[in-house]
């Protein structure tokens, strides 16, 4: 039997009611006890990394996950991370950049209802995660939820309450789980090395600025004092406004780029990505300043990839090269 390490971080799957609402209180060993069938799938060890609502997880916890997996990498055939759903897609994307070319699967899962509840999706999701982690063709970072296996760089939470909470954005699910079977749609046949490449640096000084009609460009003056990169969530396929011919946004972007900072234009629309070449409001900015754009990359991947890149380099040329270099199929339509 394969040997899998379960790394528990908290989340709804580990929560119980309190006077102030649900709070993670169930330990990693207790979680496993709710699904004894897992013992028929593999040998399992459990480790409690933290026990937090995923709203309270951040880049420090991503790096702790990396350290934990690197420390135990040679001891196990795969890893299952139990995680709250609210920020699970960010963690999956971050781990995809921080742990690259892993021939062993690193699987994130969680639930919309606690594992101690009778009517819960937790037991199925956890069992599915272990089934996938034990599959001989499984590798790299994946998110397993509601019978779907999603690339770590393509996952997004698209429903707040339903059991089918996660979607694969602009990329097919790589597999589905039906009963005790893993049905692969897309296989990763890369010849991976014995050990993956682990990274241990992130720069969290990245801000997501969501455009709304009439927004004031002076916001860039504040952001310049606090951040190295801005991800601009624009409208439609991408562009910046010039209200009544006002060029303040253009000038703010010029100043931002000339200061050596990074600007990435993405879209508020969930599917089909950006294309700044379509309209003058986007084409002129991209042509003049050479800003980066996400194309078909989900926001969670854009955020965490930018943090990872800035943790490695400050060279604008290198930043551009790394941003447009695909990692785990995070960007395909450049």
Image: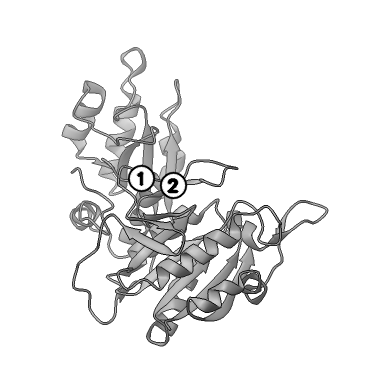
Residue 83 location (% of width, % of height): 55, 61
Q: Which mark is residue 273?
A: none
Residue 124 location (% of width, % of height): 55, 60
**Observer-nearest residue: 234 or 46?**
46
Q: Quadrant of residue 201?
A: bottom left
Q: Quadrant of residue 290?
A: top left
The mark that comes first in sequence, 1 or 2, is 2
Q: Is residue 3 left or right of residue 35?
A: left
Image point (20%, 27%), residue name = 284
Residue identifier under label 1: 298
| Quarter of the N terminus within the rendering | bottom left
**Observer-nearest residue: 186 or 311?**
186
**155 in relation to 246, above or below:** below
**160 in relation to 216, above or below:** below
- Whether tag 1 and tag 2 are in contact, CB under 8 A, the answer is yes
Q: Is residue 253 left or right of residue 3?
A: left
Q: Which mark is residue 156?
A: 2
Disc 1: CA contacts within 10 A as few (<14), some (14-19) or many (>=20): many
Q: Quadrant of residue 265?
A: top left
Residue 24 location (% of width, % of height): 69, 62
Q: Residue furthest right?
A: 19
Disc 2: CA contacts within 10 A as few (<14), some (14-19) or many (>=20): many
**Observer-nearest residue: 53 or 160?**
160
**9 in relation to 286, above or below:** below
The answer to whether residue 80 of the structure is visible from this angle is yes
Element at label 2: strand
């Amino acid at each position: 039997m394969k040997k899998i390490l379960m790394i528990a971080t908290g989340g709804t799957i580990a929560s119980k009611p309190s006077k102030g609402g649900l709070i993670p209180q169930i330990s990693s060993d207790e979680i496993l006890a709710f699904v004894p069938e897992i013992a028929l799938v593999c040998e399992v060890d459990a480790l409690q990394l933290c026990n937090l609502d995923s709203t309270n997880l951040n880049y420090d916890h991503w790096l702790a996950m990396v350290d934990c997996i690197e420390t135990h990498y040679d001891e196990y055939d795969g890893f299952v991370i139990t995680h709250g759903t609210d920020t699970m897609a960010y963690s999956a994307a971050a781990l995809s950049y921080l742990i690259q070319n892993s021939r062993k699967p690193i699987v994130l899962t969680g639930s919309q209802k606690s594992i101690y509840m009778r009517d819960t999706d937790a037991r199925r999701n956890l069992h599915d995660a272990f089934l996938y982690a034990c599959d001989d063709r499984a590798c790299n970072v994946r998110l397993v939820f509601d019978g779907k296996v999603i690339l770590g760089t393509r996952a997004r939470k698209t429903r707040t309450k339903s059991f089918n909470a996660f979607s694969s954005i602009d990329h097919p699910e790589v597999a589905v789980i039906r009963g005790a079977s893993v049905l692969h749609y897309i296989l990763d046949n890369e010849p991976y090395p014995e050990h993956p490449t682990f990274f241990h640096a992130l720069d969290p000084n990245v801000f997501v600025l969501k455009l709304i009609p009439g927004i004031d460009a002076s916001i860039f003056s504040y952001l310049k004092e606090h951040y190295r990169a801005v991800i601009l969530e624009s409208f439609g396929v991408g562009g910046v406004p010039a209200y009544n011919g006002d060029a303040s946004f253009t000038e703010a972007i010029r100043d931002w780029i000339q200061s050596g900072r990074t600007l990435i234009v993405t879209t508020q629309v969930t599917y089909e990505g950006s294309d700044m070449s379509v309209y003058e409001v986007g084409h002129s900015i991209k042509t003049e300043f050479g800003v980066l754009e996400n194309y078909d990359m989900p926001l969670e991947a854009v955020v965490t990839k930018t943090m990872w890149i800035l943790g490695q380099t400050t060279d604008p040329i290198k930043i551009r090269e790394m941003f447009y270099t695909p990692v785990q199929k995070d960007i395909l339509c450049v």
